[in-house]
Amino acid sequence: MSNKKLPHSHGEDEKITLIREQLNHVEDFQIVSEVFKQLGDTTRVRIFWLLCHCEECVLNISAMLAMSSPAVSHHLRPLKSSGLIVSRRAGKEVYYRAADNEQSRLLHQMIEQVMEITCVME
């Protein structure tokens, strides 16, 4: 973005300069967009929320959500590739859980807070 003056000055030129610098980091916003895109699907939000509370295999996730195993696997792939969940293998079984990172914790908190707000409003 250019450093041209804005059409309207509100006396916050220093703050605006910092904001413009941050807006130039388009790749950072792209990462955020990709993470939120993963949670743009109700089923993925449900799976992610479940895996924030317990570690489960595909068969158990399928049973809890009343979905087929292939459908659950389809949703697990992008969650895993985005770093929101992790897996571990125990013999032939693969177990999934929310990743132990700040991103997953924040998204989990956000989901729970939004659910609490919307449930109270109903």
Image: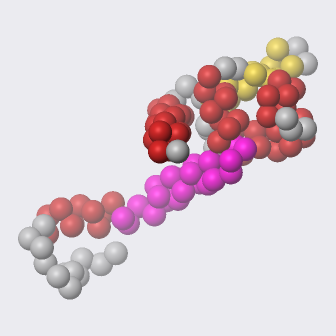
The magenta-colored residue range is: 23-44
Screen quadrant of the N terminus: bottom left
Which quadrant of the view contains residue 4? bottom left
Side of 80 where 89 appears, left or right: right
Left or right placement of residue 82 versus residue 102 in this view:
right
Left or right of 29, for residue 53: right
Q: Is residue 109 magenta?
A: no
Q: Looking at the image, is 1 positioned above or below residue 48?
A: below
Residue 23: x %, y % from top left: 36, 65
> Which of the 4 image quadrants contains residue 97?
top right
Closest to the observer, 74 or 27:
74
As drawn, 90 above or below 35:
above
User: Which residue reaches farthest left?
Assistant: 11
Using the rendered image of the protein, determine whether residue 42 is visible from the camera's viewpoint.
Answer: yes
Residue 115: image location, x then y, percent: 53, 39
Instruction: Farthest residue to the top: give it.
Output: 91
Q: Quick one: 67 or 15, which is closer to the camera?
A: 67
For the point 46% across and 55% down, the residue is: 28
**Does residue 72 lie above or below 13 as drawn?**
above
Q: Main secondary structure of the magenta part?
A: helix
Number of marks in the image?
0
Residue at the front extreme, as displayed: 122
Query: Could you tell me which residue is drawn at 79 percent across and 28 percent down?
Result: 64
Q: Is residue 73 visible?
A: no
Res. 84 image quadrant: top right
Q: Residue at x 66, y 20 (%)?
A: 54
In the rendering, at what x and y percent does residue 94 appear?
Answer: 82, 23
Q: Residue at x 86, y 38 (%)?
A: 67
